[in-house]
Image: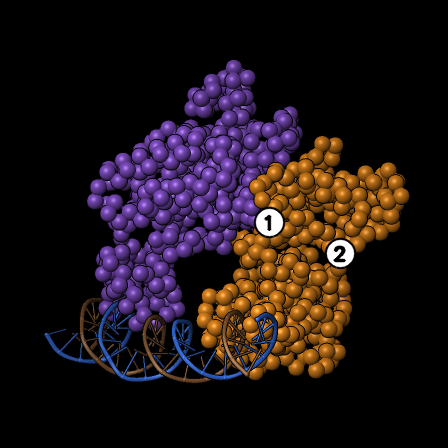
Chain colours: A purple, B orange, C blue, D brown
Amino acid sequence: MLSPGHYQILTTLSRGGPCSRTDLARTLGVSKASISGLVRDLLNQNILCEQELVFGVGRPSVSLAVRADAASFIGVSLQQDPAVLVLTDLHGSVLARVEVPRAEDPDLCVESLVDAIDQLRAAGGASTERLSGVGVALPGFVSHDRHTCVASTALGWRNVDIGAALTERTGLPTWVENDANALILGEQLFGPLRGSPDFSMVFVSYGIGCAHIVNRRLLRGNAGGAGEISHAPIAIEGFGAAPCRCGNKGCLETVASLLAITNAARRAGLPEEIGPLAALAAKGQPDALALLHRAGSALGLATAQLIQMLDPSHVVVMLDPALHDSVFAHALRKEADSHILHREGPGTMVTFRDFAPDNFASGAASLAARYFISGSDEL
Amino acid sequence: MLSPGHYQILTTLSRGGPCSRTDLARTLGVSKASISGLVRDLLNQNILCEQELVFGVGRPSVSLAVRADAASFIGVSLQQDPAVLVLTDLHGSVLARVEVPRAEDPDLCVESLVDAIDQLRAAGGASTERLSGVGVALPGFVSHDRHTCVASTALGWRNVDIGAALTERTGLPTWVENDANALILGEQLFGPLRGSPDFSMVFVSYGIGCAHIVNRRLLRGNAGGAGEISHAPIAIEGFGAAPCRCGNKGCLETVASLLAITNAARRAGLPEEIGPLAALAAKGQPDALALLHRAGSALGLATAQLIQMLDPSHVVVMLDPALHDSVFAHALRKEADSHILHREGPGTMVTFRDFAPDNFASGAASLAARYFISGSDEL
DNA sequence: CGCAAATGGTTCATTTCATAAAAAAATGGT
DNA sequence: ACCATTTTTTTATGAAATGAACCATTTGCG
């Protein structure tokens, strides 16, 4: 239906925002004549739209943009219980949302997801006429063909072909991806860092996850295990390196994960909820301050190691909103800064972002959107 | 002269070794007719040659291979003093070699390099008829256009456009690259790991260098600073974290670089040469053993961090031959293994390779060869 | 107001490119 | 000798990109 040329245009527009036909010809290095024909096709199919005129010297140019309603997608996040499902448009806006309990049994899980997808279709109404695919984000390893969950300790799954199951039941093409990868791929397609050729994301949840975009492509690694950061050995003095489930001592996740923080808080007689804990630290409670400072410093050190090794232009750290402006965030930034060597040129920018389980779901939806836009799994 | 199709064929043959026209058609996803025409052009220009027949059921297929003498290249390594220059063919074999003192002053340096290049041309004889380019590897940062050395503390250079200077004086296109990057790019084009889509290299010299290939492309990073590993905080217990020139304590290079090892050996009254030191350790001398064990463990920990973050299929560690089968190497492997989490699928393979200054020079030559083969700076 | 200059977008004949299909070549097996 | 099988070449056809001319629409200037 669409040729590589069409996809190139969609990819360019999605990456760099609206631009004129002539801009496209310049960017893609093809003739205006070719662009003209390809754009006409896409306008006829209601995938592109002409926006406002841009005036300069000469005839004004017409901005071309990808229509948000050109297609819609469903994203499924199994990252936490309950599972979150969203219906998004082609710009990543969430049109509808639903939660379902996350069943351990694969068959039951598929069952409840299919139900939830039907709910989303009903809720989406007319916008689901061009529903084009489903993406699934889950904590675990995914096969190379992105259909099968090869292993997930969190879900207790081994070799569950959830992609094929959902395709069969919904009739929609389905992509499965690791949760951290889905998150960063969503950011690459829909987020503020869209178009940046290299950046990394770190998220702090019950565990700690991480993923990288390098040369515009996801860094998957040989066995799909790239971005593993939670067992980085963080042995800062005075940390009393605690044993980790991986067998080593002093791993990052024994200090900086939400699970580790709340566990330590319980042992210290502090509130176990992260919100009240952060509030207490903000008031100056010494134990809460020390706990969050230690956790933030540890993650900061790991972030510095990441930056030294990959030199990304940005690192986005996704945090619980309660931690956003806390001693955790400050310690993180300070520790990271002090371990990053000065380089020529602009340094890596570290930014914080609010973490919400929905991010994984819309990241999952972006997997399907990506295919719609580029005709492949790469941008 | 050559079309993208021609370059695709050369790239495929260089990556996967000799294969038939039909194999090429299958691999590249184009028709046999197209391949036939493109191959004819390349045969006529003496870039490809037909090798032995491979017999199967029907008509035997003719193996096509890139001719080693299709072109030659000059590689310059400024990694150490003296500088090393090599003349290589299209398979990476060294045809001639020359050393010159590495002048600090840029103009003098260019002068002596031009002289040395003339010597190589003379020594190469007929094989330099198709001399196609020069590559330069240096310790420092290189501009994005790969012509200028932006900064090098080892050379004392800032913004030295050595690429333009050499192009002007030799009439040959010139590429400049960071030493570690040149090394890994050479491995990617000429070495045993050719064709592997993701691997990393670490080399131990007076400093410690590192570079990564990800998704078949060099991981450069935002400011060209990716692969920095020598200041990873390695704070293993009992290591008495020494202050580093970077301002922090316990950096990898304060423990595991040749400079750190020989300095520590001098303080301990041990031989300062790495060969005798390793020999002493092999005989069981406790101080020498402890010193090399500590250094190897530190590098092993850094390697483990690398593997966790990038999950490459291979890591090649380039070591002084004296260390090859020493306690250093064993400690490295052991420490790395103990910090790598089990993953699904085949794990990362860590291999040791003998380190020689010539590796940088032939890596530099590969920069020019790469352009000859792919028509761009990417494979 | 009118016209030149500048730029954006379209049309169309032409060329280039890739392909499918058919033919030719080279071998093993019967 | 003859057929099956596979590789490679040739040839006729069709799709796709292009250059150049052309039309459209604005600003700037006298």
Residue at coordinates 37% horizontally, 41% vertically from top-left? A166
Q: Is residue A24 left or right of residue C23?
A: left
Image x and y of residue A372, in percent: 34, 53
Which residue appears at 39% of the width and 41% of the height? A165
Assess disc 1: are there few (<14), some (14-19) or many (≥20) residues with their C-alpha within 10 Å of its C-alpha: many
Helix, strand or loop status at disc 1? loop
Residue B372: where, in percent of width, then height? Answer: 58, 72
Q: Point out which mark residue B201 bears.
A: none
* In-front residue for pair B306/A287: B306
Tell me how far mark 1 sits from mark 2, CA to CA. 20 Å
Q: Residues within 10 Å of mark 2 (few under 14, many from 20)?
A: some
Output the chain of dot 2. B
* Of labels 1 and 2, the one closer to you: 1
Q: Mark 2 falls on what kind of element?
A: strand
- Same chain letter for marks 1 and 2: yes
Foreground of the two, A195 or B269: A195
Q: Is the residue A203 above or below the residue A240 in the image?
A: below
Task: Say which of A214 and B156 sits in front.
Answer: A214
Q: Is residue A107 visible?
A: yes
* For residue C8, side relative to residue A360 (left or right): left
Report which residue position mark 2 lands on.
B354
How far from the left and from the top, in percent, is residue B195? 59, 60
The residue tagged 1 is B312
Q: Quadrant of residue B47?
A: bottom right
Instruction: Write the residue at 85% across / 39% down.
Output: B287
